[in-house]
Amino acid sequence: MTTGIFPPDIGGPATYVPIMAEALTARGVSVTVLTLSPDGLLYERGYPFPVVRIPRRSLGVRRTVQVIARIARLARHHDLLFAPGLPVEAALAAALVGKPYVLKVVGDLAWERAVVQGRTSDDIETFQSRRYGPWTEAHRWSQRWAARRAARVVVPSAYLRRIVRGWGVAERKIEVIPNIAPTGTGSAPVRGANARTGTDGSQRFKVVTVARLVPWKGVEQVIRGLAAMDGVELFIVGDGPDRSRLEALAGAHQCHARFLGQVPRREVLAILRTADIFVLNSAYEGHPHVVLEAMAFGVPVVARAAGGTPELVQDRETGLLLQSGTASEIAAAVSEILQDPDLRERLGQAGQASVAAFSLECIADRTWQVLADVLAASQGGGSRVQHGGGDECRTMDSNRLGRRSEGSRW
């Protein structure tokens, strides 16, 4: 498995990869994870599978060549590549050693990079059809090339299936498998004075957002919306290039905000568990892990109706959906929940009940189906799984898929 981020990093792939790697290992698969790391090249054994780390400090072509070469060396001793990250590097390495590969696409990396680098202010939908400068076009072409060459492409939402289909990937190769809800979250969120003690000792409602601090995450409007609200403290978990600007904005608007930076996932879960409301104002999400996590704790969710988020949150049933994500809309939604304890309780309970469909066992089984199918096809066994997505957990036939087969190595 290849990924650009892995614990102690935070983010969707850093959450998904260790959980899925462990689940596949439990199914008798020999898994090795390759990731980028700020700590240098390490061979880590703290997990039930080996983790190979390549230093993130290497830049440009040198790092890319190093990553491709390392993936290729590992792939020679494995049957299949599964790439939740580093898609182009994984595709090139797979081509070098003649091994099949499966991609997991959680977003448009070319668009994200173009926005962060200031090359475009277009939203992700506009980006799909417009032309840009040579660097952006090169990144977009390589991303789409890697997706088209993959044996299968796993996406976490129907929204992303449509995006990937627009890249020229055949419908039959795309599988919709949602992200995983956390387990062991308990029956109810923690409430009370200890969960709502402000930085000055006063008692405030705790509103949490977890996001990379980049423009499309909409944290600026969350700050502006909550600044005028009494009795509320905003906890901002995450880091990114916009942090200094957002800290200055919070100070200028006298918003009671704590910038917690990047923290380990266990701390993120602890923060979510004590929240009164979770807010995600992102203009784009594929299928946000953090919404699943908040809902699993029974925390009422306020989220922007963008990307794959509406596939998780049903407006006024399992949360409140924002249509535009303006400061005033955020303030109104948060105020409504805080002023109506019955609504807060109902949304929290309904959200918690809804995440049962995203259990680890269900999602791991569906992922195993896809990987086993690709492996069987590469060995001349033909296609064994009906593809094209769907939101129900399929019934498994362990013997047919060779669930415990020896020698499966990814």
Image (tube, helix red, strand yellow):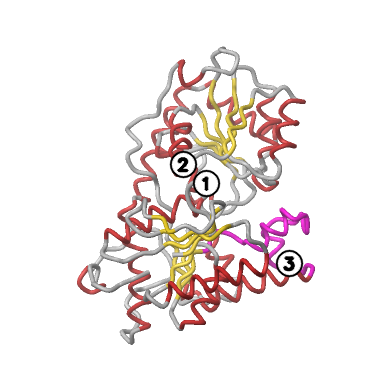
Q: Which element is circle 3 on?
A: helix
225 shown above or below 105: above
Which label's residue is closer to the chain start, 1 or 3?
1
Left or right, residue 149 beside residue 229? left
Q: Position of residue 334 (x, y in %)?
A: 58, 28
Callout 2 amino acid: Arg
Residue 265, numbered circle: 2
Packing grade of label 3 (10 A; few <14, some 14-19, many >=20) is some
Q: Residue at x 63, y 26 (%)?
A: 257
Q: Position of residue 221 (x, y in %)?
A: 69, 36
Judge left or right: residue 221 versus residue 298. Answer: right
- Circle nearer the N terminus (2, 1): 1
| Residue at which label 3 appears | 136
Q: Are marks 2 and 1 in contact (CB under 8 Å)?
A: yes
Q: As drawn, which residue projects farthest toward the left?
A: 399
Instruction: Please tell me whether residue 143 belongs to the stretch shown in magenta.
Output: no
Identify residue type, mark 1.
Ile
| Region rendered in magenta | 105-133
Which marked residue is nearer to the observer: mark 2 or mark 3?
Answer: 2
Tell me the CA gap for discs 2 and 3. 32 Å
Q: Is 206 rendered above or below residue 388?
A: above
Mark 1, residue position: 10
Q: Nearer the viewer, residue 237 or 98?
A: 98
Q: Quadrant of residue 58?
A: bottom right
Which mark identifies residue 109?
Answer: none
